[in-house]
Amino acid sequence: MSDKGITPREKNYSQWYLDIIERAELAENSSVRGCMVIKPYGYAIWEKIQEGLDRMIKESGAKNVYFPLFIPKSFLSKEASHIKGFAKECAVVTHHRLRDTEDGKGVEVDPESKLEEELIIRPTSETIMYDTFSRWITSWRDLPLKINQWANIVRWEKRTRPFLRTTEFLWQEGHTVHLTHKESKEEVLDRLNMYVEFGRQYLAMDMYFGKKSDSEKFAGAVDTYGVEAMMQDGKALQFGTSHDLGQNFSKVFHIQYADKKGELKYPWQTSWGVSTRMIGALVMTHSDDDGLVLPPSIAPIKVVIVPIFKDSNREKVLRYTKDVYKEVSKKVEDVEIDERDFVSVGFKFNEWEKKGVPIRIEIGEKEMNEGSLVVVRRDTLERKSIKFGNASDEVISLLEQIQNSLYEKSKELLVSKTHRVKNYEEFKELFEKNKGFALAYWCGSEECEENIKYETKATTRCLHREGKSISGECIYCKNKSTEEWIFGKSY
RNA sequence: CGGGGAGUAGUUCAGAUGGCUAGAACGCUGCGUUUGGGACGCAGAGGUCGCAGGUUCAAGUCCUGUCUCCCCGACCA
């Protein structure tokens, strides 16, 4: 990581995002409001994430499903606090047909085609799924029900930000239904831990996680738990949530089952999700001034081999390159050879660095004669020469080292930018200067939380050390408090 | 919805007090020379200056209207 500490904001995202996404400019003179085009390389990263996470989700017992994109408006009117959170920021389908304009040069909405009941483009699928659940679930034998959906959703946010908050985004949403609250609460925490585990293992990111405050929780949830990561600029990025829905939805959607005694009961529900925002988090955690740095676990290309040749030795070098490729591929997946002869070697080096490929192998006349190869790691740009015979072992162990060292760095950043503050003065100073996370007691009153937000722009991220018997005084009102919270400025 | 800024080539932008054939860099195409850290030379393609009116002999430039985008807030993963 460079000590310049350049943030994506200063760079306006372009340097880091260019290979992954671009702003959608599909219509003339307008971009499709806050939407992004995900380029092949960016989508390949998403596929890696899907692959890893989907495996974990299935291990939890959830099965993949697909529900409709359209939600009848009436469904969203059922859960009162749920509407509050979403109803205002949704895309609404009101008509179903276009007709030619009178001048014949275009099309317009046919007023005759007005829908009797408007359809909402899903901002999340609780309502449409739970309506169906009410028919799926009739007996205690049907529980627990665990399903997951990979889908796109639309939230008409007032302000969008590339990758971190786009109008349309891809995500995974899991929904489970349980016999008891004890069981559903366990599920909520299990899935939260699954996200943390995934973040650490695959994304090489460390993070805090825990219960959110009432003001930050999901509309319609009893409790929301979140995963909070720290970006290089010290700002917080929430990249996953897990909700304890209690019986709030089962009651309004009439999900009922007959228990062993034949009595009708409302089950307990959870929902949990992560989105393409994860890629944003990944980029903003590891990248440096030279471009992306991808952890090997989710890099679409783990190793790129760049042969260095002239017209005179081209065939020989390429033949040796293929041998190296075969040797390395014995134990490593996603290896590519960059054989292009219309760009210079320097150009290639730079290009693969920008794309964050974890390991680059350089092979030229010299290596061919020595039976060696040069290996360069992206995270440290350290280069070394290794013997052909050791290639696949060396590369695989280097990939592991990169993965570990990225995680360690992320952990270090998280720890070094987290400060336990004693009083409000220290608290304010922290957010004026360094940013990062503050650990502080909070009494739980919404008033204190709001004042803090107003005065410092820092918000509660999540509860720290839940369940520990600790006590101190609220950072704002100085009343007694038994809860320590993580505060941060958030994206 | 409030507060700022901007619409000129594929991209980033320059075009001062109106002036004649609208520019640069990067990118793109062709040819040649190159290739161990973003190559170079030459030749080319590419623009009704966001849109609609108006003022003027003359508008990218001035006026009016309008649309759109970007940044900062409120909302949020």
Image (cartoon, coloured by chain):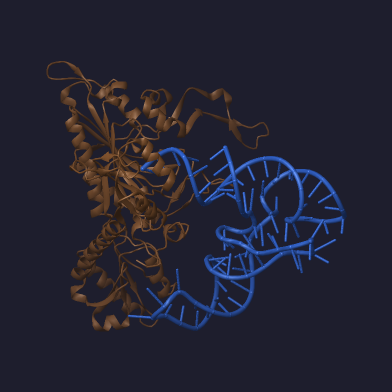
Chain colours: A brown, B blue
Please state which of residues A465 and A259 is positioned toward the viewer in this rendering.
A465
**How many marks can you see?**
0
Question: Which of the 4 quarters of the picture holds residue A406?
Answer: bottom left
Please state which of residues B37 and A315 is positioned toward the viewer in this rendering.
B37
Please state which of residues A9 and A255 is positioned toward the viewer in this rendering.
A9
Please determine whether, in this image, residue A21 is positioned above or below residue A216. Answer: below
Identify which residue is drawn at 21% across, 76% down. Answer: A388
| Image spot of residue B57 (x, y percent) | 87, 55
Identify which residue is drawn at 41% across, 74% down. Answer: A346
| Image spot of residue A100 (x, y percent) | 61, 32
Say whether residue A288 is left or right of residue A183.
Answer: right
| Image spot of residue A460 (x, y percent) | 34, 44
| Image spot of residue A311 (x, y percent) | 40, 80
Please determine whether, in this image, residue A136 is positioned above or below residue A379. Answer: above
Question: Which of the 4 quarters of the picture holds residue A6?
Answer: bottom left
Q: Is residue A292 visible?
A: yes
Residue positioned most to the front: A478
Residue positioned most to the top: A262
Residue positioned most to the left: A260
Please state which of residues A18 and A102 is positioned toward the viewer in this rendering.
A18
Q: Is residue A157 visible?
A: no
- Quadrant holding the N terminus of chain A: bottom left
